[in-house]
Image (tube, grey):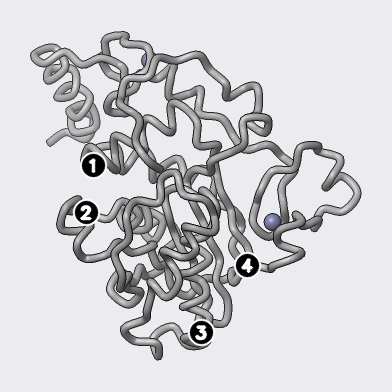
Amino acid sequence: MDRRISEWMPGLVRRTIRFVLPMHCSICDSSLTDDPTPHFCTDCWRTIGLMPSSRCSRCDRPFPSAIATAYSPNHMCQSCLIRPPSYTRAWTLYPYTSPLRDAIRLFKYRGTVSLASALGALMIKQLPLLDRVDVIIPVPLHAERLRQREFNQSLLLADQIGRALGIAVSYTNLLRTTSSPPQTSLTKQRRLRNLRGAFALQCPDEIRHKRVLLIDDVFTTGTTVNECAKSLRRAGSSDVLVLTLGRTLDHDLIPDHVRVPHRHPFEPFGV
Ligand SMILES: [Zn+2]
Ligand SMILES: [Zn+2]
């Protein structure tokens, strides 16, 4: 097939499908035509904003004022100073606000896996400079949850990052051994109680002295990634880095440019 035709085809197929089965943007309800992201118009998708610039050099939590890191770029938040996490560094790429929040909920809870590549592309666009990573590991789901959901959203994201960086993805080594109810509205203490000892390595030798990049979709309190990092470090990993697509933020810390008015198309879900 002529190269120009093959490049043009996906857009044509998309427009034809949307002509037959009209779809609307999940945020503003406008008709979707050749918008590349399923369920979102290009204008709404473009409103996904970046995190505030001044953040903890360990857990990436934004500081209320940019002055916090103006004079000391490696400034850490109080929580990391008092109780340093088991990972060396976390990057949380975008505020978990609409429309990203809607997209992640559709992806994760409604099985809209067609959003995986758009969400993976967002992560790849903001990848930090990573010195050396030996292996990428997605945060695992418990087998029971995996059976219900039929896919691990973090693995779909990790797979794209692995391809972009040319780094192997390991998805059977780190296991979630206990099932706990959704963490949705639990306090940090309750989350910690639920997750303590919930992760284990099937083959610790595979990650011994290895630098691991742990991938998850949303960073809420950081308990999940920290418990994973703890298991990895105990099993002999030399270093654990964390990368998540979204981060929940206190209302006051959400940058003005990402506070867009929107209608809520879905029932409230947990994170
Ligand atoms: Zn829209
Ligand atoms: Zn911190």
In this rendering, which labeled residue sits more in front, label 2 or label 1? 2
Nearer the observer, 177 or 56: 177
Q: Residues within 10 Å of mark 3 (few under 14, many from 20)?
A: some
- Amino acid, disc 1: Val
In the rendered structure, which disc, 2 or 4, sits on the residue that comes first in sequence? 4
Q: Amino acid at mark 4?
A: Pro
Residue 264 position in % (x across, y down): 37, 19
Q: Upstream in the sequence, badge 3 or badge 2?
A: 2
C-alpha distance separating marks 2 and 4: 28 Å
Local packing at callout 2 (Cα closer than 10 Å; few below 14, some 14-19, many 20+) is some
Decide: is 198 above or below 62. Answer: below
User: Which quadrant does the C terminus fall into?
Assistant: top left
User: What's the residue type where badge 2 is placed?
Assistant: Phe
Res 85 label? 4
- Point out the frontmost of discs 4 and 1: 4
Identify the residue under disc 3.
Answer: 234
Beta carbon at label 4 within 8 Å of ligand 2: yes
Q: Residue at x 57, y 71 (%)?
A: 132
Q: Earlier in the sequence, mark 4 or mark 3?
A: 4
Looking at the picture, does residue 235 appear above or below residue 135?
Answer: below
- On whether ligand 1 comes within 8 Å of the CB at mark 1, the answer is no
| Residue under numbered circle 2 | 151
Provide the residue designation for mark 1: 113
Of circles 2 and 4, which is in front?
4
Distance between mark 4 and mark 1 Cα atoms: 32 Å
